[in-house]
Amino acid sequence: MSELADTVCEPCRGGMPPLDAAGIAPMMELLHADWKTIDGHHLQRTWSFSDFAEALAWVNRIGELAEAAGHHPNLHLGWGWARMEMWTHKIDGLHLADFVLAAQVDELD
């Protein structure tokens, strides 16, 4: 398990600034190469599958992990693909918790 995925992170309660580019860059190096940052605001990753059922099963696995973590990404689903987008709403940007959940999703892969 990666060090980041093993991190226990308290959910963000707000009142702090989101990570800036200098804080995001080293975190991105700890994630699977398919993760992208969108406008320095949120994380996004897309997976491909052979059919709808596999994509749905993957989204359900992410959903179970997210619910247990108390951190809820946007999950998008279509025939043969799934996409996850995530940011911390309370600070309207990226927080350590977003990178921890992304690393934990990487461990599912």
Image (cartoon, helix red, strand yellow):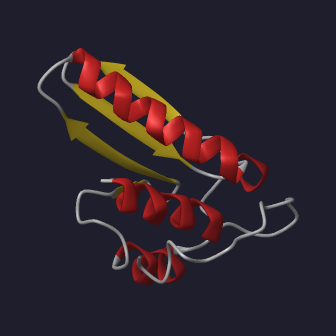
At 47% across and 61% down in the image, what residue appears? 104
Q: For this view, does 33 lie left or right of residue 9?
A: left
Residue 86 visible in the shown view: yes
Rendering coords of residue 53 (x, y %): 27, 18
Residue 3 % position (x, y): 48, 84
Q: Position of residue 102 (x, y in %)?
A: 46, 59
At 55% from the left and 67% from the top, the residue drawn is 100
Q: Nearer the viewer, residue 23 or 86?
A: 86
53 or 23, which lies in front? 53
Residue 95 in view of the camera: no
Image quadrant holding the N terminus, namely bottom left
Out of 42 and 109, give the one closest to the viewer: 109
Left or right side of 51 for 40: right
The correct choice, above or below, for 59 with respect to 79 in the image is below
Residue 27 vs residue 64: left or right?
left
Residue 49 figure quarter: top left
> Which of the 4 image quadrants contains residue 31?
bottom left
